[in-house]
Amino acid sequence: MTALSVNVNKIAVIRNSRGGNEPDVVRAARTCLQAGAHGITVHPRPDQRHIRTDDVLALAGLVAQQQVELNLEGNPFAPARAGYPGFLALCEQVRPAQATLVPDSDGQITSDHGFDFARDAARLAPLVAALKAMGCRVSLFVDAGGAGLDQARAMGAERIEIYTGPYAEAHARGDAVAALRDCVTTAEQARSLGLGVNAGHDLSQANLGEFRNAIPQLLEVSIGHALVSEALYAGLEQTVHNYLRILDSRV
């Protein structure tokens, strides 16, 4: 079965809009895990617009207690600044099971593209090595249909995460064939190189089943925005159950 890692960034967005500690990020993550989620994902950004360093530390304690995985996402090239020690320094503190490297700039609302390996491989390689020395499994964010997976493998990455935003947009238009084919091709190429395959971004209950059925080798999906949005109507526990049923079905 494909693992579900719930991204709780949006819980922190709501909290930060008002201040204080409600809704409680750790309580939300605990609810997801009690409902059967296999892990928790967070993507702290240097501007601390949602998940903060103190959240990462608290969530690391929760996942250790629950014996599940923490997937820490971030841009390894972003410099440290007040309140944010830098991605590798944060990984050094909490030792996540998985470090997912994402090439997002400070000004991006959300991640919207994968690495350009022709440009970034030389800078990425020592960072991948450093994360692996910490005991982290390293995953690299990639575009479906993009080039350079052989470079990702050569630098020591163990997984890729396919950026599924274009697939989700195409699915919403009712014409996902080409976008899904790009995802399948990338997944097959990754597996042929010995890379595990994760996926994430704009996956939802509406489009996840088709995606999962097309890529049987899919190891993990990290889902946040859609899951939290849907939970406003159905409740967090029920929504996690809904996703787990989709991942466990073969319809």
Image (cartoon, rainbow, N blue to C red):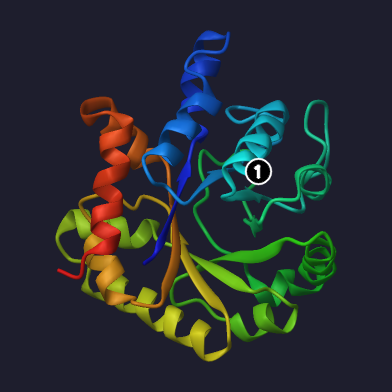
Report x, y in % for residue 242: 24, 46
Judge left or right: residue 54 versus residue 198.
Answer: right
Judge left or right: residue 31 versus residue 215.
Answer: right
141 to 230, vertically: above or below: below
Front-lying residue, 224 or 102 = 224
Report x, y in % for residue 89: 84, 45
Judge left or right: residue 127 versus residue 220.
Answer: right
Front-lying residue, 102 or 205 = 205
Q: Residue at x 73, y 69 (%)?
A: 120
Q: Quadrant of residue 247?
A: bottom left
Q: What amino acid does circle 1 point to? A: Ala
Report x, y in % for residue 13: 50, 25
Q: Quadrant of the N terminus?
A: bottom left
Front-lying residue, 44 or 171 = 44
197 to 89, vertically: above or below: below
176 to 81, vertically: above or below: below
Report x, y in % for residue 231: 29, 31
**Residue 170 appears anywhere in the view:** no
Q: Residue at x 51, y 17 (%)?
A: 15
Q: Which residue is mark 1?
A: 64
Q: Residue at x 28, y 44 (%)?
A: 241
Q: Quadrant of the C terminus?
A: bottom left
Front-lying residue, 66 or 70 = 66
Which residue ends up furthest to the bottom in the rendered image?
Answer: 192
